[in-house]
């Protein structure tokens, strides 16, 4: 009470000294009290937020510890089951395609469409091991150095970015294949059919193209000129002269393209390899 009385007395004296009305003094007192109360509330909220942060951090650490322990236990159990033979081990995935898709007819069940995307086929006799019917098959990014695909039917196959240096494509039919950005250095294309293939940005330096048919193939101008220097013979299957198929004697305006059959009536049209129903998710019959 004494302290309160002294504070009140001091306030009244200050009011008289400055000629303040007592009502003004009460207003000043309320302002001071309000400011002090606001400060207390701010401090209380800050302490509450710090407590909540500490609790959240602790909970997160505990959850992470529980999750890590559960994951380790699950992995240990799965490993034990696989080792014991109770559950079979998962099939090894090679690139984006696997052997089960190949057994089912390939992606979208189109053609023979075997899947070799990213496979290591070095020095492999592909034709002997997997058969010669490799139409629409996928060899994207495959390692094919020194591999053998003699007599293979590779119509519409995907060989983008394939590394097939020294590969043997003798008597192979590569019509409509996508072979861009591939490495075919010193590859053997003797008697091969490469009609309407796409070979842009591919390297065929040193390749053997005797009797090969490049009708309407798409090649870089530089590579076309290099091939023209070594082109010789006539393809035994199509009867097309190799130099003529490469347009070695014509101007750039006469160079063919894989889609020429769509715009010119006299252009040879590719033969359908499969029924239309195999290219669609919908049945046509």
Image (tube, grey):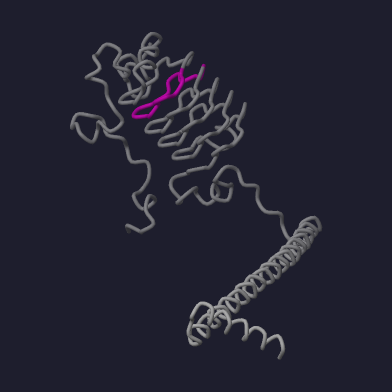
**Residue 106: x %, y % from top left:** 50, 47
Indicate yes or no whether the magenta region holds residue 224.
no
Q: How many marks?
A: 0
Q: Nearer the viewer, residue 69 or 156?
A: 69
Task: State the residue at coordinates (51%, 87%).
Answer: 22
Residue 140 position in % (x across, y down):
50, 36
Tell whether 41 sits left or right of 82: left
Determine the residue located farthest toward the left in the rendered image. Answer: 265
Q: Is residue 150 left or right of residue 195?
A: right
Residue at 23 percent across and 14 percent down: it is 251
Q: Residue furthest bottom?
A: 1
The N terminus lies in which quarter of the figure?
A: bottom right
Say which quarter of the image contains residue 148.
Answer: top right
Q: Nearer the viewer, residue 12 or 190?
A: 12
Name which residue lies at 34% across and 26% down.
218
Say above or below: 141 vs 33.
Answer: above
- For the C terminus, the quadrant is bottom left
Q: Secondary structure of the magenta portion, mostly?
A: loop
Whole-percent x, y for residue 143 in the image: 58, 30
Q: From the viewer's perspective, is residue 78 above or below residue 7?
A: above
Where 61 sits versus 251, above or below? Answer: below
Is 202 inside the magenta-drawn segment?
Answer: yes
Does 7 appear above or below 67? below
Q: In this rendering, would 175 be left or right of 52?
A: left
Q: Where is residue 273 shown, x and y percent of the image?
A: 37, 41
Question: Which stretch appears magenta?
Answer: 186-204
173 and 51: which is toward the camera:
51
Which is nearer the eye, 215 or 78? 78
**Could you say which quadrant of the image residue 176 lies in?**
top left
């Amino acid at each position: 009470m004494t302290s309160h009385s002294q504070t009140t007395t001091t306030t009244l004296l200050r009011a008289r000294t400055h000629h303040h009305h007592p009502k003004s003094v009460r207003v000043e007192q309320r302002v001071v009290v309000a400011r002090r109360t606001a400060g207390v509330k701010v401090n209380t909220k800050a302490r509450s937020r710090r407590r909540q942060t500490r609790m959240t951090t602790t909970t997160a650490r505990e959850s992470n510890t529980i999750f890590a322990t559960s994951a380790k236990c699950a992995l240990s159990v799965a490993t034990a089951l696989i080792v014991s033979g109770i559950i079979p081990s998962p099939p090894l995935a090679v690139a984006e395609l696997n052997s089960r898709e190949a057994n089912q007819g390939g992606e979208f069940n189109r053609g023979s469409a075997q899947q070799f995307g990213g496979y290591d086929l070095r020095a492999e006799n592909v034709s002997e091991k997997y058969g010669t019917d490799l139409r629409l098959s996928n060899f994207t990014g495959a390692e094919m150095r020194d591999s053998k695909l003699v007599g293979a039917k590779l119509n519409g196959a995907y060989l983008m970015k394939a590394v097939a240096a020294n590969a043997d494509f003798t008597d192979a039919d590569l019509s409509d294949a996508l072979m861009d950005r591939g490495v075919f250095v010193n590859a053997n294309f003797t008697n091969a059919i490469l009609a309407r293939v796409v070979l842009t940005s591919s390297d065929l330096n040193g390749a053997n193209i005797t009797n090969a048919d490049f009708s309407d193939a798409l090649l870089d101008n530089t590579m076309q000129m290099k091939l023209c220097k070594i082109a010789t013979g006539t393809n035994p299957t199509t009867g097309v002269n190799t130099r003529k198929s490469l347009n070695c004697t014509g101007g750039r305006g006469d160079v063919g393209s894989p889609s020429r059959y769509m715009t010119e009536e006299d252009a040879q049209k590719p033969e359908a390899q499969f029924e239309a129903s195999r290219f669609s998710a919908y049945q046509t019959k």
